[in-house]
Amino acid sequence: MAFRNDLVQEMKMRKVTFGGANSLDNFIARTNDDVGWLRWNKEVTAISTKFWKTIDTVVMGRKTYEVSVKLGAGAHPGVKNYVFSRTLKEIDDKRVELVSVNAAEFITEVKRKPGKGICGMGGGLLARSLFEANVIDEVGFNIHPVLLGSCIPLFHEMSRQIDLELLECKRLSNGCVMVRYRVKKV
Amino acid sequence: MPDRKIIVSIATSADGFIARLDGSVDWLDRPGTKDHYGMMQFFKSIDTILWGRKTYDMSLGFGKKGGGSFGSKTMNYVFTHNPPTTKDSRVQFVNEPIKTFATRLRAQPGKDIWMMGGGNVIASFLDAGEIDEFIIAVIPTFIGEGIPLIAAKKRNVQLALLSTHAYEDGVVRMHYGVSDKL
């Protein structure tokens, strides 16, 4: 039963999660901007620590990576780091693997290999191409009680509608609302 | 705190849009809940609706198909630079500074005031300091592109989360007060 085998394969595949902190009007925290509006407390730290234990791979676009480097962070420790770029020739950091092939196809291959979850950092063009290629399994937001009006939008505009299933909604003591959705595949 | 509150109550997609670029809201159509995500109760707390011109015109379109009627007791103010004439006593077209209008409206006795939107009129009222609360129902879908909740302009408006509710079908309703107005 080929269909059944596909289903089992799909269930075994590693989960790709995208998300981050956003304002109520859906602008994302980008580290090169003023992030004074971000709220951090023990609750958020605990959720974040728990999540990091479920992943072993981080994927990000070139711009997100460059911002991370500028801030002195660069690669994320303790996980495999993939940076996607068609323009960069090399990255002078052994902890990072530069990938110049199609991101959706590459990550789909990574998903088939054994391992823990895969986390997408930042939004931007990488997130859009992965959404459109059906590669993202879950999205999570920490909705902050603030309206920013302009900044960098969480996701670039996408060409089609993507339906979601609410998995979790948690009100935090600092006024944030954490929501987690499963992406319905087409 | 003013006696009559001006409250934005609206549904957005999970990517923060109130309508598609052509104004359509087909993605809002869903079986819904008994209390219409709290809208029935909210509607009892208001007696006045504020509209942007495009949103009002869209709603008249819905009315022809049997929807969009908000009852004979509700007063409607429509913001436009080109006020047309109307014989409907429940509709007034407004073309005056927001602060002047809002101050006069709040001074009249009555229930709370529903800011219907769209994004431009919400932005104008917000930047004039004339929005008290936001009630946002987040629909579990990314529509990809559309009209944002509030017209773009750099701002930093702090909110206070008053309540949140997750409905069985995945809609999340969040109720905020604008911090400066609390």
Image (cartoon, rainbow, N blue to C red):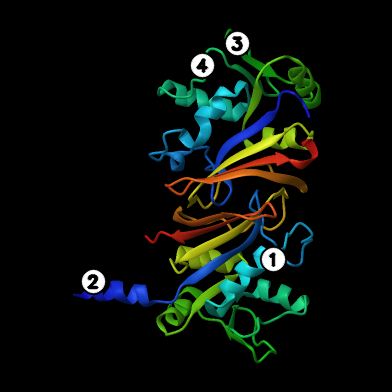
Of helix, strand and loop, which one carries label 3? Answer: loop
Cα gap from disc 1 to disc 4, whole angstroms: 48 Å
- Residue labelled with disc 1: A42
Q: Chain of mark 3?
A: B
Q: Is residue A88 above or below residue B128?
A: below
Tell me the CA gap for discs 4 and 2: 53 Å
Whether labels 4 and 2 share one chain: no
Q: Are marks 3 and 1 on the same chain?
A: no
Q: How many other residues sit within 10 Å of disc 2, few (<14), some (14-19) or many (≥20)?
A: few
Chain ID for label 2?
A
In the foreground, A105 or A15: A15
Disc on res. A3? 2
Q: Nearer the viewer, mark 3 or mark 2?
A: 2
Q: Amino acid at mark 3?
A: Thr
* C-alpha distance separating marks 3 and 2: 62 Å
- Quadrant of residue A36 within the rendered picture: bottom right
| Residue identified by numbered label 4 | B71
Which chain letter goes with mark 4?
B
Cα separation between marks 3 and 1: 57 Å
Question: Mark 3 or 1, which is nearer the eye?
Answer: 1
Determine which residue is flagged by label 3: B86
